[in-house]
Amino acid sequence: MADVQETPSSSELSVWRLEIKRGRGDDVMQEVLRDAAAKGAEVLVLDGRNVFGTEHIASATFHARKAIREGRNASDSLAMETLLYAAGERQLSTAIDKMSVTEDTTEMVIACLTDHALSAKEGWVPYTATSASTETEKLKNYGIADEELETVLPERRYDLILERVATVDLIKK
């Protein structure tokens, strides 16, 4: 398992967006995973529809590393534990259904979770905090309810995602 002593900040994480053709998700994801494994890097590949920027991934990685360090992890790998937190879900099967690349995926997010260098390939665009979308429909698709949206100002909607990530620690108990 990857070293879980230090957690990268969103500025230290390598996260990219990749536009793909519908139906190519699994092939492209397998290529990314093979390349990462050959370099000794642990990566998380997600459907971009439910990713809200580098802070989202950094927060999920932070909580996953902390859970592993404290022996509270629900998964055997940093990538799968991070997936749980990124999805804001307790169950791996639910997190996989919510965040995984499918044949309908047209945007992938690739996050290198270890300090091993993984170089961007053609078409990989750095995913930044400004890449994040907090459009109402995207938030609802992620699972944020209207009642939750009404509790915050529009410019603070991103906080609902970070709150959902942190809540996994409570619902895992």
Image (cartoon, rainbow, N blue to C red):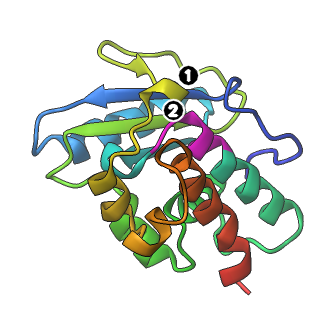
The image quarter in which residue 149 lies: bottom left
Is 12 covered by the magenta stretch?
Answer: no
In magenta, the rendered stretch is 52-58
For disc 2, the marked residue is: 36
Q: Residues at badges 1 and 2 in contact (C-beta under 8 Å)?
A: yes
Please, is residue 92 above or below residue 135 in the view?
below
In this rendered view, identify the residue nearer to me: 49 or 153: 153
Q: Quick one: quadrant of the C terminus?
A: bottom right
Q: Position of residue 78 (x, y in %)?
A: 66, 54
Q: Position of residue 10 (x, y in %)?
A: 67, 31
Residue sitting at 10 percent across and 45 percent down?
A: 23
What kind of element bears circle 1? loop
Residue sitting at 79 percent across and 63 percent down?
A: 68
Please, is residue 50 above or below residue 15 in the view?
below
Q: How packed is label 2: few (under 14 Cα within 10 Å), some, or many (20 or more)?
A: some
Query: Left of 83 or right of it: where is 34?
Result: left
Q: How packed is label 1: few (under 14 Cα within 10 Å), some, or many (20 or more)?
A: many
Q: CA distance from mark 1 to mark 2?
A: 7 Å
Let me know if residue 52 appears in the view: yes
In this rendered view, identify the residue nearer to me: 123 or 134: 134
Q: Position of residue 67 (x, y in %)?
A: 79, 65
For disc 1, the marked residue is: 118
Residue sitting at 32 percent across and 53 percent down?
A: 136
Let me know if residue 81 appears in the view: no
Tell me which amino acid carries mark 1.
Leu
